[in-house]
Image (cartoon, helix red, strand yellow):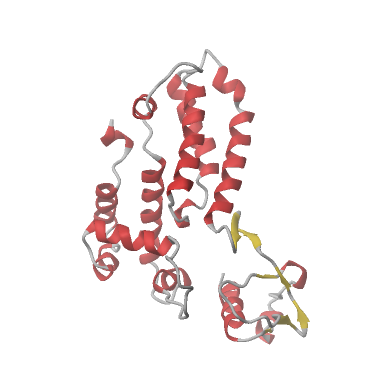
Amino acid sequence: MLNESIIFYIVFNNATVKSSPNSRRLGLNIHRGKSKILKINSASTAPILLEDVALEEVESFTYLGSIVDKKEGTDADVRVRIGKARATFKQLKNVWKASKLTKNTKLRLFNTTVKPVLLYGAETWRTTLSTMNRLQTFINGCLRIILKIKWPEKISKQELWHQTRQMPVEQEILRRRWGWVGQALRKPGCSTTRRALTWNPQGKRKRRRPRNTWRRDLEADTKRLGHTWKQLESLAGDRDAWRTLVGGLCPTRGSQA
């Protein structure tokens, strides 16, 4: 991770990427074929060079299983996660149809096999209405199959969540986000993850309504919590207090039932 952080820093500050002699001695070389460049809000058209060879510029790439997309942002990653979760759900179709398995067993399997695939990386998603609707529609469809509720039978989403002890996906993502923020705030001040939370890149944006971003979601949540960022940094050191804080922001399934 340290090596990757150094690489990103050099790319931001110089048009040429060079492997340091120390990293080469340790076998930490930059692979030209696996290295891609994605420029965001950059007016520069100059290529990024690795040892005098231009690296390929792309519109999106996959990093640690998550999609980083220049134009679609979170939407691209959500679309892929839904596709993978749908494939996982279909692979277990015999489980959902099995009459010998109880509803609770099926729901535990759903929560431990399908949900993790669907919400992988959700801690850093921006939560737009359209994104949440797509995720919730997929989850509700799966739950209806598990409960064997077929068209034209109707059930309200509140009753569906009550019977399956599920919380709205937006609240689940909120819990994941702030659980991750707590972990990040407990890291040393020199940590790249910790610094990324408050990093403020300078520049001018286009004259139009700014798009919703993960950072703006975080700022809105902070206002709802009634705390300043400094207070949250101090509170994160107490894990029990942090869990209480997150629990107040987004209740668990048990407290909603």
Rendered residue at 63%/35% (across/down): 87
Rendered residue at 36%/61% (across/down): 218
Rendered residue at 68%/75% (across/down): 28
In screen coordinates, is 233 left or right of 94? left
- Report the number of discs: 0
150 in relation to 219, above or below: above
In screen coordinates, is 159 left or right of 128? left
What percent of the width, then of the height, locates residue 37? Answer: 67, 72
Quadrant of res 89: top right
What percent of the width, then of the height, locates residue 120? Answer: 52, 48
38 in relation to 177, above or below: below
Seen from the viewer's position, the closer of residues 113 and 69 is 69
What percent of the width, then of the height, locates residue 36? Answer: 69, 69
Q: Quarter of the image for the N terminus: give it.
A: bottom right
119 in relation to 21, above or below: above
89 in relation to 118, above or below: above
What percent of the width, then of the height, locates residue 250? Answer: 30, 46
Seen from the viewer's position, the closer of residues 165 and 188 is 165
Outermost residue toward the left?
Answer: 226
In screen coordinates, is 184 left or right of 54? left
